[in-house]
């Protein structure tokens, strides 16, 4: 009788262990909507008149990556690498629309990396400028990094060297950070570790219209 009772308990436990995941799976399946028919998705062709604009956009985006004669970043007190980012407005030749753009160094190197190196802090600082003489300058209060966390998106982060991204430059303590600045810390422990990043610079006009300023995808290299 004891053996029979023990067998029943074992079977009950086994049944529960098998049925619980099955029930969970069934529950998840029940929450799913019907299959989506992507053959019925909204489709559109690119009109011929826009293709030249698209080609010009790709060339212009590449041009936002500015090569530096000396890509080594000079460290300030505390191991800070400060990068000034020019932000400008450009008027379309046949439209009244003003487009926003921001140029970044194609590559910066953080010299002296290695196991015994101290951590470095990279700070990007937005500076409104006129692209050409007579061009409009974006008002300083309209230009910010997008978010406290999503101001610079890491597309690549070798050896997890880049961490603790946030708006501000780290000098405001517990106060409101400067939204025209964004920082990332770099552990600086691994040589040749590369990061590729995508800055998200936003223009918020006085009428509430929000647009993303065009930016490239630059690199940072531990050297």
Image (tube, grey):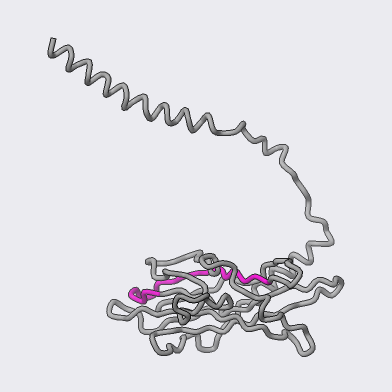
Could you say which is closer to the camera, residue 38 or residue 29? 29
**Relative to 92, residue 33 above or below:** above
Counting from the top left corner in percent of width and height, residue 160 is at 39, 66
Counting from the top left corner in percent of width and height, residue 92 is at 81, 73
Give the magenta range: 186-203
Judge left or right: residue 83 versus residue 138. Answer: left
**Relative to 158, residue 173 above or below:** below
Question: Residue 76: which quarter of the image?
Answer: bottom left
Q: Residue furthest top?
A: 1
- Whether residue 200 appears in magenta in the rendering, the answer is yes
Which image quarter is the N terminus in?
A: top left
Judge left or right: residue 221 versus residue 91. Answer: left
Q: Residue furthest left?
A: 2
Counting from the top left corner in percent of width and height, residue 155 is at 51, 64
Q: Residue at x 50, y 88 (%)?
A: 70
Judge left or right: residue 183 versus residue 206. Answer: left
Q: Residue at x 42, y 31 (%)?
A: 24
Which image quarter is the C terminus in?
A: bottom left
Counting from the top left corner in percent of width and height, residue 50 is at 80, 62
């Amino acid at each position: 009788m004891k053996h029979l009772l023990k067998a029943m308990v074992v079977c009950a436990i086994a049944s529960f262990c098998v049925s619980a995941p099955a029930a969970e799976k069934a529950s998840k399946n029940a929450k799913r909507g019907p299959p989506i028919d992507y053959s019925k998705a909204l489709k559109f062709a690119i009109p011929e008149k826009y293709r030249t604009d698209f080609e010009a956009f790709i060339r212009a985006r590449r041009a936002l990556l500015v090569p530096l004669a000396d890509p080594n970043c000079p460290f300030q007190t505390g191991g800070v690498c400060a990068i000034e980012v020019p932000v400008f407005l450009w008027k379309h030749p046949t439209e009244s629309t003003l487009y926003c753009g921001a140029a970044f160094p194609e590559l910066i190197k953080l010299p002296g990396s290695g196991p015994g190196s101290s951590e470095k802090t990279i700070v990007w600082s937005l500076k409104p400028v006129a692209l050409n003489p007579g061009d409009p300058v974006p008002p300083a209060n309209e230009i910010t990094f997008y978010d406290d966390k999503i101001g610079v998106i890491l597309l690549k982060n070798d050896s997890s060297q880049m961490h603790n991204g946030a708006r501000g430059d780290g000098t405001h303590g517990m106060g409101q950070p400067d939204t025209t600045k964004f920082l990332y810390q770099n552990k600086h422990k691994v040589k040749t570790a590369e990061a590729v990043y995508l800055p998200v610079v936003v223009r918020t006009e006085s009428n509430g219209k929000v647009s993303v300023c065009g930016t490239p995808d630059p690199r940072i290299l531990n050297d």
